[in-house]
Image (cartoon, rainbow, N blue to C red):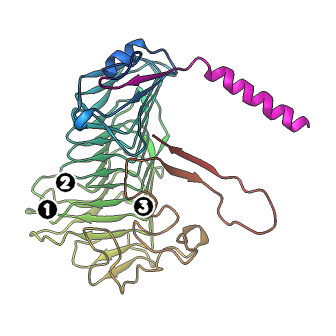
């Protein structure tokens, strides 16, 4: 009985907290009380409101540049159907402000921040950008989850980037300079993209797991490495685990493309490194700091330039491990069941882990395909589940609409 009363009290408290939030409806030719533009709904809103956007008739876009200067949530009226916008979305920073955008499709324009205060929380979930970028500086903590960018890039200073797809080979994920937090931890997990660069003054820890990092065209530009971390430190700053990295050949030797270009030590485990099937004159290579790296259970094509951190468990192979368009293993390959044999690196079916982006519990299968509809995108679960009857605590994150 006491438990019932406690739960009821909590429920009433939640209802009281939510009673101030209002749903604002955006609908073309909608009934009285609705708004014809997203900007008008934002103007009428207060902190905590939700703006529900109906797609326009004939799937036409809302033609407007949108500024969000309140804690708001923008969602589609129908789960799995994106509302279209022709214009930019700019989020003004303010301490403790939270802005969530779910299910938008920008037919032109970017989603970005204008710095004005510390710290704004931004969630960009299940969106599609036909041409623009997602770009936020160090005034923002940004969760970029399950989005498709057809030709743009992602740049943030703090937050996480999970389950996104960048389709243009000139695009990249950038961890930009921050003067706000040192020793921050960021997760870059389960994405498909061409390359990643963490800039010179970004003193952060990066977990780079289960990504398919792929560029196929011959490299003609200097310094376009697949994973580049430019902050110089003697501490281990990176965890590079279960990625499949396809790096292009280069048309010249000076400034050739690299699998890895790291100025701080890293844990490098269960990865597959290959040169692109489109051959040029110079294969990709690796630049690592001289001490502090831990390399194990990686698979490297032998017709590429040397990988200087080889350990007794790293394997040089004679032919391609993976389909370079999908990241799936080509059998037979020693990468199958060839990851670190520890239980924490097992595959989802509890078999010994595979190397590459589809191995381990963060398998790329968890994040693709991107549908734009509701989904759970993150689970925190314990390793080593037993049958002893102890409580099992699982924390899940997701979104709908």
Residue at the disc numbered 3: 210
Instruction: Where is residue 306? Give x, y as percent.
Output: 27, 72
At 22% from the left and 37% from the top, the residue drawn is: 58
Q: Do the residues labelled 2 and 3 touch (CB within 8 Å)?
A: no
Q: What stretch is highlighted in magenta?
A: 1-29
Q: Do the residues labelled 2 and 1 touch (CB within 8 Å)?
A: yes
Q: Considering the image in quadrants, where does the C terminus appear?
A: top left
Residue at the disc numbered 2: 169
The reply, left or right, for residue 184 in relation to residue 57 is right
On the question of residue 363 being in view, the answer is yes
Question: Quick check: is 40 in the magenta stretch?
Answer: no
The crowding category of the residue bearing disc 1, from other C-alpha atoms within 10 Å (few below 14, some 14 to 19, many at least 20), is some
Q: Nearer the viewer, residue 217 or 301?
A: 217
Name of the residue lying farthest toward the bottom: 332
Q: Which of 355 and 150 is in front in this view?
A: 150
Instruction: Where is residue 366? Give x, y as percent.
Output: 46, 60
Q: In which quarter of the image is residue 304?
A: bottom left
On the question of residue 179 being in view, the answer is no
Q: Quadrant of residue 65?
A: top left
Q: Which of 162 and 58 is in front in this view?
A: 58
In terms of secondary structure, where does tag 3 sit?
loop
The reply, left or right, for residue 351 in relation to residue 329 is right
Note whether 1 is above or below 230 in the view shown.
above
Q: Quadrant of residue 89?
A: top left
Residue at the disc numbered 1: 217
The reply, left or right, for residue 361 in relation to residue 15 is left
């Amino acid at each position: 009985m006491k438990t019932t009363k406690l739960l009821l009290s909590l429920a009433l408290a939640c209802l009281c907290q939510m009673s101030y939030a209002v749903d604002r409806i955006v609908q073309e030719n909608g009934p009285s009380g609705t708004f014809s533009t997203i900007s008008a709904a934002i103007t009428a809103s207060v902190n905590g409101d939700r703006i529900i956007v109906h797609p326009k008739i004939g799937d036409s876009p809302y033609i407007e540049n949108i500024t969000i200067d309140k804690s708001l949530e923008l969602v589609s009226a129908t789960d799995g159907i994106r509302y279209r916008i022709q214009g930019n979305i700019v989020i003004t920073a303010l301490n403790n402000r939270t802005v969530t955008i779910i299910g938008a499709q920008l037919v032109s324009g970017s989603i970005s921040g204008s710095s004005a205060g510390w710290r704004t929380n931004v969630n960009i979930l299940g969106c599609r950008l036909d041409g623009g970028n997602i770009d936020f500086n160090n005034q923002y903590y940004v969760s970029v989850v399950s989005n498709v960018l057809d030709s743009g890039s992602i740049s943030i200073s703090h937050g996480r980037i999970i389950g996104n797809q960048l389709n243009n080979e000139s695009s990249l994920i950038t961890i930009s300079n921050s003067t706000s937090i040192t020793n921050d931890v960021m997760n870059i997990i389960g994405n498909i993209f061409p390359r990643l660069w963490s800039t010179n003054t970004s003193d952060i820890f990066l977990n780079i797991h289960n990504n398919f990092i792929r560029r196929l065209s011959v490299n003609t530009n200097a310094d376009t490495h697949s994973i580049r971390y430019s902050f110089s430190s003697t501490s281990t700053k990176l965890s590079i685990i279960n990625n499949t990295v396809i790096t292009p050949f280069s048309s010249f030797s000076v400034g050739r493309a690299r699998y890895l270009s790291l100025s701080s030590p890293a844990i490098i485990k269960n990865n597959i490194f290959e040169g692109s099937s489109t051959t040029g004159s110079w294969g990709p290579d690796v630049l690592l700091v001289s001490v502090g790296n831990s390399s194990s259970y990686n698979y490297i094509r032998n017709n590429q330039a040397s990988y200087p951190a080889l350990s007794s468990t790293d394997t040089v192979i004679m032919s391609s491990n993976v389909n370079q368009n999908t990241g799936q293993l080509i059998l037979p390959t020693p990468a199958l069941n060839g990851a670190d044999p520890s239980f924490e690196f097992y595959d989802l079916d509890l078999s010994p882990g595979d190397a590459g982006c589809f191995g381990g519990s963060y398998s790329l299968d968890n994040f693709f395909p991107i549908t734009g509809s509701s989904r759970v995108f993150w689970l925190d679960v314990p390793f080593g589940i037993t049958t002893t009857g102890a409580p099992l605590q699982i924390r899940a994150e997701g979104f709908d609409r």
